[in-house]
Image (tube, helix red, strand yellow):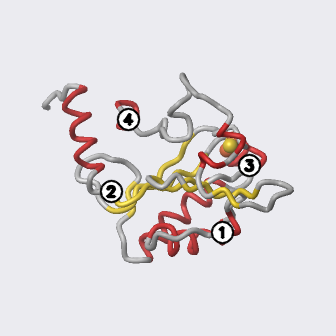
Amino acid sequence: MTKLSIEDRKSAYEKNRENINKRVIVCAGTGCIANGALGIYQEFLEAIEKSGQPAVVSMENEAQGYHVSRSGCQGFCQMGPLVTILPERVMYCLVKREDVTEIVEKSLLHDDVVERLLYHKPGYGTACRTIDDIPFYKRQHRLILKHCGIIDSEDKYDHIL
Ligand code: FES
């Protein structure tokens, strides 16, 4: 068996990432799981495959298509289940399993958003299109936790970012 160095694995990861159209991250912290996140994760895998596109769960080998992964708690549990679409950083809140097909259609296959699932600032009604527009995240400057919400702790490739 050939041993690969961390650098080799990192460059394989970077190379595989080039073939990934977009990444879907379903928050799989305790709060989001309690509200159905694992079913939503499964629904993404099925809805992407149904659309005729490949869905991958790890960057291993020659991954291509849409990468669907799970993250740890992103801190915004009251708005979960959360779903993030990269690279745009669109964040959807209070997602239900029945919303998944529409997210796939609009956010993955087209560069559109599902407006009703965006975070709306209370009292203003303004929709926050990305994570960076949401006041809860905007006021944070994360250092140690800067990859929280992106890394899939069960995917070894995510640990060598
Ligand atoms: S469990 Fe998803 S934000 Fe906390």
Give the crowd class for mark 1: few <14, some 14-19, many >=20 residues within 10 Å: few
To which residue does mark 1 refer? 115
8 or 14: nearer the eye?
Answer: 14
Outermost residue toward the top in this view: 144
- At a point 74% along the width and 53% down the height, the residue shown is 35
- At a point 68% along the width and 47% down the height, the residue shown is 134
Q: Position of residue 122 (x, y in %)?
A: 83, 54
11 or 122: nearer the eye?
Answer: 122
- The residues bearing labels 1 and 4 have C-alpha atoms spaced at a distance of 34 Å
Q: Is mark 2 within 8 Å of ligand 1?
A: no
Under mark 2, the amino acid is Ile
State the mark number for residue 131: none
Query: Mark 4 touching mark 2, by CB under 8 A?
Result: no
Q: Secondary structure at mark 3?
A: helix
To which residue does mark 4 refer? 156
Q: Is mark 3 within 8 Å of ligand 1?
A: no
Q: Is residue 83 above or below residue 159?
A: below
Under mark 4, the amino acid is Lys
Q: Secondary structure at mark 2?
A: strand
Q: Earlier in the sequence, mark 1 or mark 4?
A: 1
The quarter of the rendered structure image containing the C terminus is top left
